[in-house]
Image (cartoon, rainbow, N blue to C red):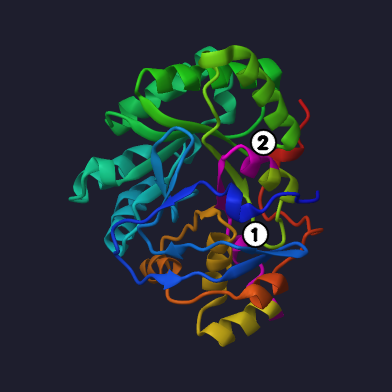
Amino acid sequence: MHMHTRLGHQLPNLIHSSPISKSSAFASHCHRAMATQVPHKFDIGTKFKLNSGYEIPLLGYGVYQTPADVAEQVTLHAFQTGYRHVDSARAYRNEQPVADAIRNSGLKREDIFFTSKVPPRSMGYEATQKAINSSFVQTGLDYIDLYLIHAPYGGKEGRLGSWKALVEAQKAGKIRSIGVSNYGVHHLDELEAYINSAGDDGSKIDVGQWEIHPWLPRDDIVEWSRKRGVAIEAYCPIVRGERAGEEVLQELGKKHGKTWAQVLLRWSLQKGFVPLPKSVTPERIEQNADIYDFELDADDMKALDFPNSYAPCSWDPTTSHD
């Protein structure tokens, strides 16, 4: 899993907007054996420009396992805090209350980035068409910013059929950007071969979403995505709290006057990822967004560099070979 490219030259285009929070100059970060300068400034309004031409806010709010009866309330609090990106899915069963939060936020629809996903039980062309339609019925939205294939199940025919349905919905203007989640490099290669053979009907992969943190860096997937301009979203960016007691996080937290979780989220940003922290606690929702007034220096990033680590805290469909 060697990296042969300078990540600073492979990141999607950064766009700065809505200075809702403090911004800061961004120093260097260390990736594997080399230091890479990424001369960007971040604030909570910073966005990536995707392959589709649309923009994605760099910080997302995740609603995995957020109960439907509280999803609207906590999503509204996230919007009030400054988040403009919310990551849902058909399987989460909370698309509707999240969409209600969008409508009741007082914000313009175009200022909010909403994601949903094809559930594993809906793989295949027709089933994915139905899943997409159900998202629109439940949310009442005119368009969805990003739709991902949640996991690479269903076999090759199912995966490619689902992708074809996403491409058609994108061409129809229903979905603005499309992508995959939990795909291994072999799944990505399979999809790329299909896209190349389909010509204009293949579209492009705009976004990939994976569990990524220092103990699961996924360098092979990151390299694959960088070379193709695929934006990388990181779920479980704070490792579900399982690493809170790690000495390195405690030391870096003390050094910067930040919590261990804020250190991990800042690491994710400086790696060029789109972290998707989730919480239903108002204070933590706010803390997770308070990551723009400090920087991890090259030594800090090196201290969090575990290139050979493989320690998922969630499922890992990337290893599937069906």
| 295 part of magenta stretch | no
| First in residue order: circle 1 vs circle 2 | 2
Count of numbered circles in the view: 2
Q: Residue furthest left?
A: 106
Q: In the image, which residues are magenta?
A: 224-247
Q: Nearer the viewer, residue 218 or 280?
A: 218
Q: Is the residue marked by circle 2 packed among few (<14), some (14-19), or many (20+) residues within 10 Å?
A: many
What number is the disc on residue 183?
2
Q: Nearer the viewer, residue 52 or 244?
A: 52
The relative height of residue 255 versus residue 309 in the rendered view (above or below) is below
Q: Nearer the viewer, residue 230 or 91?
A: 230
Q: Position of residue 285 (x, y in %)?
A: 40, 65
Please, what is the three-letter code of the amino acid marked with disc 1?
His
Please, what is the three-letter code of the amino acid marked with disc 2?
Tyr
SS category of the residue bearing label 1: loop
Q: Is residue 238 left or right of residue 35?
A: left
Residue drawn at x 51%, y 12% is 126
Q: Is residue 104 left or right of residue 215?
A: left
Q: Position of residue 12 (x, y in %)?
A: 51, 46
Tell me if residue 100 can be seen: no
The relative height of residue 291 versus residue 253 in the rendered view (above or below) is above
What number is the disc on residue 175?
none
Q: Is the residue marked by circle 1 packed among few (<14), some (14-19), or many (20+) residues within 10 Å?
A: many
Q: Position of residue 195 (x, y in %)?
A: 61, 20
Mark 1–mark 2 distance (CA, rounded to whole Å): 16 Å
Q: Which residue is mark 1?
A: 213
